[in-house]
Amino acid sequence: MAQKKGNDDADGEPVEAASTEQGSQRKKLSRTIWVIIFGAFAAAFASGATVLFKIHPVPLESALVMVIAGSVFAALAVRLTLIKLRAKHPMPGWLPNAVCISLVVIAVAVCSFAYTYNKPPPETDADGNPIGLLRPANDPMPQIVSNWISDARAARFHVTQNGNVLLFGGNVIMLDKITSVPIVRFHDRVMIRLSASSSGAFISGEFFDTNRNVVATIESNKFTLNRANFFREIRPDKSTLTVVNNQNVEALAIRFCRTNLFSISGTFFFPDGTCAIATKTNCFYRGSSFYGQFFGGGDGGMGIDSNGYVVWGSSGGDQVQPRHFQ
C-alpha cells in the first residue's frame, strides 16, 4: 500500500500550496490594516492642519508641517492600495512607488510655495533698519464688534455697519464718518493715530523703550524698526507685527485683521518716562484703567494732558485737533 508523501495533507492537497495561500491572505490582511492605519494618521494630521488654519494669526509653519505629514501618510496608504490592486489589475511594478513619491513631492512643493508667498521677505532701508508694510488679512469681524454695532443701531445711534474699527485695550473704537482720530495722545503729541480712506483703515504712530529711544515708527501702515533699539521682531504673516524692545518688553503688537479692522496692544512709553499698557482686555495708565467701552463717533482712545489729567474716551485737550471730519 502506497504511503502519502510528507507534504500532502489528509485530503491529498499539498501542504506547501495551502501554506503559501494562507501566507498570501495574511499579507493582504496585513496590508489592509496598514492602509487603515496610514489613512487614520492622514486624517488626523489633516484635521490638525484645518484647526491651525482657522487660528488668527495662522501658525503657518506648524500648519504646513501638519499638511506635509498628512500627505506622507496618505501617499503610503495609496501605495499599499495600489499594491493590493496589482494582483487583479496588471500594472507596472514601479507604479505604486512612483505614485507615492509623486504625491509627497507635490505636497512639499505646494507647502513650500505657500510658505514663501505668505512669509514676508526681510527688507531694510538704507541704514539697515527693518521696514515693511502691514497688509490686511481676512479675519472675521469679532463678535464683540458686531454686538456693539447692533446695540448702537437698536438705540437709534447712527453707526455704519462696515465702519473702520480699532480694538484697543478691550475697547472698540470706530471711525464713523470720521477720517482720523488720535488713539494715544501725550500732551500735545499724538503717539498713535487711526485714520481711514475709501480703501480702508491706516495706523500711524511712534513707539519707544524705557530709555525713551525710538523702537519703531508706523506711517500709514508702513513700519520702520530701529535696529539698535529692538530685541526681537515677530512676523508670522504679512498682517501681523510684534516688536520686543531691548529690555525684553513687548513695545508693540499689531494686527491688520481686515481692511477695516486693526487690533493693537503693547507697552507705550512716553517722553516723561511713564508708560501706558494696553492688553487684549484692558488699558492701564498710572492706576487708571478703562475697558469694555464702545466709541462709535470717532471719539475714543486715551489722552494724557499736561496738567496730569487722563482723559478716557476723548481725544481733546492741549490744543490737539481731536477729530478730522469728512
Image: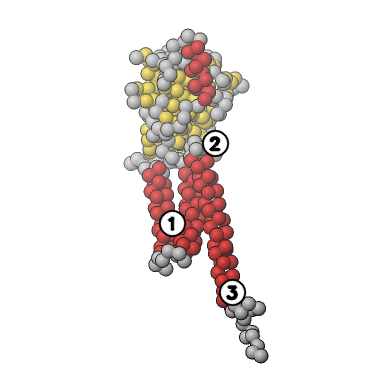
Give the answer, above or below, for where 314 lies relative to 77.
Answer: above
Give the answer, above or below, for where 271 lies relative to 62.
Answer: above
Disc 3 packing (10 Å; few <14; some 14–19; many ≥20): few
Q: Of discs 1 and 2, which sits in the foreground?
A: 1
Residue 294 is labelled as none
| Residue at 45 percent of width and 64 percent of height | 88
In whole angstroms, how far apart are the C-alphas of marks 1 and 2? 42 Å
Q: How many marks?
A: 3
**Mark 2 / mark 3, whichever is N-terminal:** 3
Q: Quadrant of residue 6?
A: bottom right
Residue type indicated by callout 2: Val
In whole angstroms, how far apart are the C-alphas of marks 3 and 1? 39 Å
Q: Of discs 2 and 3, which sits in the foreground?
A: 3
- The residue that disc 1 covers is 104
Residue type indicated by callout 3: Ala
Residue 245: image x %, image y %?
Answer: 50, 37
Residue 18 is labelled as 3
- The residue that disc 2 covers is 249
Q: Which quadrant, please, contains the C terminus?
A: top left
Q: Can the viewer see residue 54 in this picture?
A: yes
